[in-house]
Every structure is written in C-alpha cells, then in structure tokens.
Amino acid sequence: MAAALSRSDCSAVDSMPGFCDGMLYLATPEGSGDARVTEPAIAPGEIAVGAIDAAAVWQTRLLADALRYTTLQLCASKQSGHPGGFASSADAIAALLMLGQKNLVTEVGHHAPGYYSAMFLDGSLEAMGIRTMTDLQARFRERDGLLGHLSGAIPGLLAPAGPLGQGQHFAMAGAYLHRDRLFPCTIGDGGLGEPYVLSAMKHFHTAFPEVTNFLPVLVWNGYSQEHHAMVSLMDNKSMAELWRAHDFDRVILIDAKDYDDAGQPGAYVDSTLFGQQARGDFTRGMLEAMREAADSAMGGTLTVVIVKQLKGAGMHAQGAKSHNLYPGDTAEKPSIAQALQRGALSYEQWALVRTNLFRAGGGPAAEVAVTEHERPLADIGTLPTQALSVGEKAVPSSTMAQMIAALGERDPGFIVSNADGTEASAMKVINQRLGIRHPTPDALYHQGPTGQVYEPLSEDACAGLAAGIALFGGRSLWLSYESFAINGWPIVQTVGQAMAELRRRTPAMVTMFTAGALEQGRNGWTHQRPEIENYIGAQMRNGNVYLLYPSDANMIQAAYAWATGQFNKCISIVASKSLLPVYTTPEQAEQAIREGAVRLYESAGEGPLVVVAVTGDMALLPVFEAKDRLEATGKRVRIVAVANPRRLFRPRDVAWRLSAESDGAFMTDDAFASLFDGDALLAVSGGGSTALEPVLLRSRARARDLVAWQRGETTASPAEIMACNGITGETLAEWSTALLAA
C-alpha cells in the first residue's frame, strides 16, 4: 500500500468522495493507468464480480482493507467497541460482498462495528442520515444510532446479535423462508463453544435436508474475548472432522498460514503482513472458496467455510488484546495511528470500494436484503373456535391445539417447535394433523419427512428457529413446558427487542407454556419452575411484550386468535393441560384479552367486599373455594381474571411509544376501579407474581396483599403443591378476612 498522509496534509482532499469526510488518513494515489484501480470489478448492471481475475482479487483486497480501516477508526472515535474479531473475518466478508451476497447474518455481536462499516460503505446507512465518516462516528454507540451490538434497527442488517450461539438460527430461518437466497452466517470460535451451535444445525439438516442455502463461516482466529479460544489447540483436520460429524458434507478451510511469506510464528497468522503476491494469492483463494461454497450450498450440499486467521489482523494489536478498545485508545494513540496509516486507502480506491459495494447484490443492503421488505403471508382467515358453555369443563391446551392445527393447514410455511412434548401437553391433535418433521415415517407417532412440527430435544433450538422465522417474516409457535422455557428464552428476548425496533411489520413471536408447576407434582421441583413467568413479566415494561394468562378454554382461544393477528410483538401464553371449569363466555374471553381483565364472579347483597385478582387457570380452584368460605361468613367476593396484565399498567409505566407497531391501549382508571376497587384486595398467582404488579400499583383498596408461588416439591396432586405454597381455599379465606380487619 502507498504511503498514508493525514487528511490535512493530503493535496487530494478536494477530490475525495463525499462519504470520506472525516477519514483521518488517505493513501497517496496509485498510478491511474492500472485497470485494477480505475475500473470497478463489478461492472455496470452486474451484481457480482465475474471472473476471478486480477482486478477482482485486487479490489476484494481493497474492500477488506477498507472494512478494517473504517472499523478501527470508528471504534477509536469513541474509545470503545470491538474491532479485533471482525478484522480476522474482513477478507471473508469482502469476498462474500464482492460475490453479491447481501443477506449476511452474524452470531457475533462484537463484530458489530465491522458490519456497520459494510453498511456505511454500500450506502445503506444513508437511510439513517449517516452519509459521511463524520456522521458514522457521531452516531456510533449512541442512542438512536448504531448500538454497540447489532439490533433490529440498522438498515441492511438482517438480525440482531449479542448473546453467543444465536446467529445460526437466523440463517436457518432465512434459508427456510427464502429458498432462492444464500444466508452466510459468521460464527466466532468463541461462540462455537456454546453448546447448541453445531447440534442445532445438525438437527435442522436432519429435519430439512433440502434446505442447505445457509452457509456458516467459522472465524477461527484462536482467541476469545480475554484469552485463547477453547478450540485454539485443534488442528485443521480435527476441526474439519468436527463439522463433518455434524452433517457438513463440504468443508472448505482457508488457512492464512498456507500463504504466509513473512515467517510469522504460531498456527494463526495475519494476512495483512504478507507480501504483495502472497496477499493476492490469499485473497484469490478466499474468493474462489466463497464462490465454491455458495454454489455448493445453493446446489443442495450442506457446506461450511472455515477461515483461519489471527484475531486482530491489520489492527493495532493482535490476539485477545485486539478485542476491545478502552478509554485512552484514541486514533492518536501511536499503535492505533500506525494501524490506520498502514490500512489507509487513496480517494480513488475509496471510490472503487463504494461503487463495487453499491452494485453488489443489486444495490445497498438496505434495499435488497430480504428483511428490508414485508414478507407476504398466507391468508389464514378466521381460525375455528369452540364456543364452550360456562360451567362445563375443557382442557385449555387442547382447545388451543385445534386452532394451531388449522393455522398450519392454511399456512404451509408455519412451524410449531417443541422439545418432544406436544402430546404430553394434551396437544396431540397438532401432531396428528400437521405431523412431526422426521426422516423416519411412522404413522403410530404421526411423523414423516414433510411434517410441520419441529422437535429437537433442545429448547434453544426450538426457540431459535421459531424466533428466527417470526423475525424474518413467517408464522411460528414455540411450545414448551413452563419448567424448561428458560433454556430457550434468551433468543426470544433478543428477537422481541429487535421487533420493537424494526422498520417493517412481521408476525408476532408467539410462545405457549404448558405443564405448569401446579401440574407437575410427581416430577418434583425439577419440573416446577414458574419463575420464568417473572422473567417475562419484567419485560412487559419494554413496550411490546405480553404475558397472557387465560383463565379457561374459551379465553385461551381468544388469546391465540388475538396473538396470531399481532405484529412486532412478543406474546407468551401460560395455560394448563388439565380438565378445568369454563368461567367465561366467548365474548367475555375476548374482552379479557382485549382490555386486560374481566370479572368472573361477584357476590350479591351487602357486606365488606374482597377483590381477588387471579392470574392463571388452575389457581382459580382454591380461589372459588375461598369464595364459598368467605360468603358463608357474610363477606362479599369479586373474582377478577387478570388475563393480559400489560393492558393494566399505566401508560407511563411502559415504553410503548418506542416500539414499532406501537400499542398504547391501557385500561382507564374508571374501568380499573370498577374491577379492582373494594375494601380489600388479594392478588393470587399459582406461578410468578410479577404479572400482578400493575394491579397492586393501581389498586386503591385500603388493604392489599399477595399470595404467589414460593417453591417446588414432590407431591401427589396439584392441590398438595398449592398447599405447600399457601394457596388453598382455607388460607386464602383467612388472609382475606385478616385484610378486612386490618
């Protein structure tokens, strides 16, 4: 590379492309007679390089340098951010982009500044008003700007990235929904240590062998965040065998060490230190490998590319020391300034980079990435429901299952994910009508290769595919035992937040948790973990998270009907698989979900009034028993089902204005008072207590108290579990009487 000058010393500043405003260093111009410099390798009207010739190789190398330079200066501008990991993948990303691949996903949130650099250089960030390097730096790691980790708000970027081990789910979901596109996904060798990355892809391939149009790109750089990666001692043969053991028939490994002409020690080397010929050979090898991999993946072969290059290649430091910038790591710091000078481009080269990236893939990613447009959905009409009579008994989960099956029959792309427990949740009809996706046909188990029920024995894999499909514009449902949901919830939380930031509508992420703590007596505390409800309940303040507690079979149908009509929301339904009474008419059930709560019962006559606010269905059994005891002593009782507690908050409690498809519907003070005002208020939950927070916040009852789940135990019946937690008719009546006397 030619010598670099500071921008203030460069006589060519006036000739710079406008987007370069703010760049600290420019290389001196190259000779204008070299075709590699003057003509973009992606020709007008084309979306990728054609032949991998000298121009394509040279300009791919320029792009890799441009990505590294922009990433480092961007992080230095805030003395914060993570340049090192992306730097080792820059050559791979440059090759993919020059080959027209714009549907890029990453598993590594720490690579965010590199992906922001790519979106800046292809013009995508102009949709955010980011047109120059100065703008890019001003908006980096700032509110309403470029978050420290990828989110749903950034034009051109398909999916959020933060927690490790999630990106492959988005790539597989994209591939499932868009069979004609390739979805490359970079995976860090630190993230590879997460337990679900490879197993999730193996199960997906077993279930969907025809869907191979996703391309994992392992960034094998030898280091994690603060130390060596746990896979750093593996040799190339062992790493390739690891992927082959997980069904990858084509393993393409590009090892920078094979091209090194600088005598660098160790297994991991920096390609930016190679001589000119070696750098060109390495870049050519990368382009050829990526083209081969893309053709292989699109041609029906499960393929992975492994890029082995030292972490921090081309940066101010190497290894884990390149991972993060800290206060004092400014662009003036000698090590950073020197790295910027080494990687600087001339204004002619910046112009080539911009033109190539603008043309690649058919335009800026903000215009051509699949997630930048609302995906058409199959028309499912009105789902069938059963109008059950008050007083009869029905299984809530089973009634919802009929609706799920109908939805799947009307939308062939719909996926139900479950960790092998649909039948155990009294939802067998889903398996019968939609079929379990399995390579072994067996009518006894309702399984076959075309089923719509996806059943890996991993809640992470279940939640991951369902969440990815919802984010990418499809319909899905994750069913889980309440006890195990925590193992898959992190990606749902990630997607829920991303949905709140999206610039397009996408179907709500819907989950349903059965087999709650109260139904799992014989299994003991291992199956009694309703604390997940508190985790989700705390997120209701985010603005687009809803935790629904239908009180009976009519209300669960209303809940699912409402959820399937929502967009950009994260909706969880908690219900039982036991035969339980029906308390509401279909009209009351719809009202409860729409408005937040509904009166199930109120005593006639005079006497002090106890309001019992209840979340859940099974917990209503001891509540109605308590009602009989209280009425026998001359007290009045009003039982209120808290069905959609998000609606019961005050508008100021929830960040609803910040959410896409914002929902500002909250129960009015008068309506709330008509339900919850009384002489005493007792809030009751058979699970987590957080969902009752808005009731306790707004209640004007003179005396208030809360009875909720405490801990699990091995018992013979739900009644015994509730007794262990103080949720019995006798106890509730005693507490209510004490409240009235307080």
Image: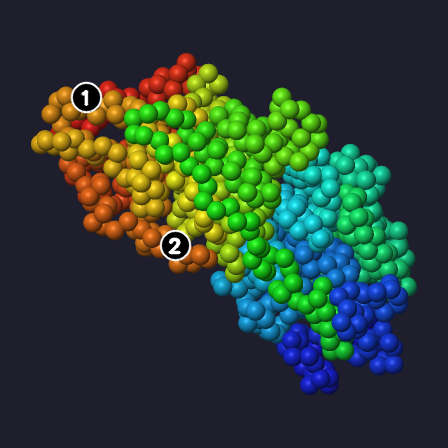
Q: Amino acid at mark 1?
A: Arg
Q: Position of residue 362 (x, y in %)?
A: 70, 66
Local secondary structure at mark 2: loop
Q: Position of residue 484 (x, y in %)?
A: 52, 30
Residue at screen point 52% across, 40% down? 407
Q: Which residue is mark 2?
A: 663
Task: Please name the residue that numbered disc 1 is placed on.
Answer: 629
Residue 656 in the image, given as x and y percentages of width and height: 39, 55
Q: Residues within 10 Å of mark 1 (few under 14, many from 20)?
A: some
Is 48 displayed left or right of 544 in the figure? right
**Residue 323 picture location, percent across and down:** 66, 53
Q: Quadrant of the N terminus?
A: bottom right
Q: Earlier in the sequence, mark 1 or mark 2?
A: 1
Instruction: Verify CB contact (< 8 Å) between mark 1 and mark 2.
Output: no
Q: CA distance from mark 1 to mark 2?
A: 41 Å
Question: Looking at the image, which residue sits at the far left?
Answer: 606
